[in-house]
Every structure is written in structure tokens, then in C-alpha cells.
Amino acid sequence: MSDKARAELAPTGVLRAGINLSNFLLVTGRSATAEPEGVAPDMARAIAQSLGVPVHLVPYKSPGELGDAVGTNAWDIGLIGAEPQRAEKIAFTAAYVEIEATYMVPPGSALKSIGEVDRKGVRIAVSARSAYGLWLENNIKNATLMAISGLDAAFNKFRDEKLEVLAGLRPGLLKDIEKMPGATILPGKFSAVQQAVSTAKPNKAGAEYLAAFVEQAKKSGLVANLIEKHKVKGLSVAPLTTP
């Protein structure tokens, strides 16, 4: 590790790690001191340990808020979904975990497959500025995308206004479907959200260090061990990148 990488990633002598609290798979609880706990916080702690510096977790209510704070000296690394819109200002590693994103439809829906959703007259509720929501913004051509702030609010919009489709992470939809007897989660996925580690674009040495760390974390079993430690269902270790 170069001194330059450490200086870029921990300029204050502490690694400030932005954590997205809305991802219930990666942040699964709080410690006795109210610190976020889960796979993402533990990844941040492992990176700090490898750098030889303390860690300070900086919580955000949504991935959008975390992404907006890049370049404001609020965080040094961010654990967030990697999406093209965010890559303009943020340098991402390859994914360390993946989360399947799919659709839920109400009882009696004529929609039976992922491919049938993107057509005129179909309204899709989605949590605004989520990684899978950004993917839909780039890829939905015919259906109407209705972005609502927050996971619960997106479900409420879908239910109360009798929309045709709710987009979400499969583990979250498995909870939502319990609130709507007769609803169906469509088979397959429209995207796999790539959860990565990031830093501000100018931090080239830091970005290279994080990229190498993530590949080693996948290869060594660290990521798999964290998933097992926190007993998370719906997360899988992302594939190693090809050299």
C-alpha cells in the first residue's frame, strides 16, 4: 500500500465511511452504542484495519443522500450501489455483493414475466434514487416509472393507488408480499444491484487500493464470512473480476 493511498482515503487520520442505512441487507442492526451493524459496516471496519487507522461510520438515510455528499469532505469511502449516474463523481470498485432486483404484482395481475412489464399502461412504483431505481430510469422505455421516497412509501403507493407493479429487492418484496395476500413476485430478475466500495473520483491511488482490497476480500472468504456472520438471506458474493 502506498502512502498516497492512505493519505487519500484517510486524510484526517480516520477512515470516514458513508453507510446507507436504508439497505436492510447490508445494515442489519445497531450496536449497544447505536453504531450501524452488518456486512457493510464490517467491510468498512476491515478496510480501516488494513489501512492501520480508526474508522468512523457516517450514516445516511438513503443511497441518494450518501451519493450527494461526495466531494463535501463528509466521507472518505462510501458503501453504496454502483450505478452510471453516480460514477460521474464517484470511483467504484467491482461489486463485493449482489442483490437480485425484481417485480411484485397484485392479485389477479395479467403480468407473468419480467419481459411483460415494460409496456404502455403499466405503472411501476419504486423507491426513489435506489440503485435498482436508477437502473430502471436508464432501461424502462414504455412503462411509467413512479419514484417515491422510501421503501414503505413505495409499497403504500403501489397498494393504495392500485398500481400494476412494485419494483424492489427480492428480500424486501418477500416481506411486502405478506402484506398483500394473493400478490405474486415475478420469477427471475431485471437487474442485480452491485454493492461496491467507493471514493471520490480524484482519489486515484485510493481507488486502486480499494479495488484490490475488494477482490482479496471476495477471494479470501471475508465477504462470505460476513454474510454468514450476520445471517443475511438474499445476498451473494459477487464474482471475482477477470484480471
Image (cartoon, grey):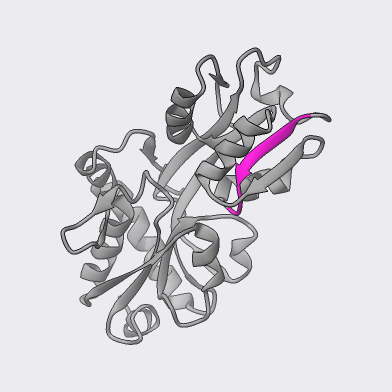
Q: Is residue 103 above or below residue 1?
A: above
Q: Nearer the viewer, residue 115 or 58?
A: 58
Can you give x and y, in whole percent of width and height, for residue 156 in the image?
57, 37
Q: Main secondary structure of the magenta part?
A: strand
Q: Is residue 229 above or below residue 109?
A: below
Whether 125 is among the magenta residues is yes
Where's the N terminus, which quadrant?
bottom left
- The quarter holding residue 88 reads bottom right
Q: Is residue 145 left or right of residue 173?
A: right
Residue at the left extreme, as displayed: 32
Q: Is residue 222 above or below residue 171?
A: below
Looking at the rendering, the stretch of residues picked out in magenta corresponds to 122-129
- Could one spot residue 243 in this view of the protein? no
Residue at the front extreme, as displayed: 160
- The quarter holding residue 209 reads bottom left
Whether 24 is among the magenta residues is no
- The quarter holding residue 116 reads top right
Residue in the picture at 54% in, 14% down? 182
Q: Nearer the viewer, residue 225 or 212?
A: 225
Can you give x and y, in whole percent of width and height, for residue 61 in the image?
45, 60
Can you give x and y, in whole percent of width and height, for residue 172 in the image?
45, 35
Residue in the picture at 52% in, 74% down? 70
Residue in the picture at 67% in, 43% down? 136
Q: Nearer the viewer, residue 201 or 128?
A: 128
Can you give x and y, in whole percent of width and height, for residue 141 in the image?
80, 39
- Could one spot residue 135 in this view of the protein? yes
Q: Is residue 13 left or right of residue 21?
A: left
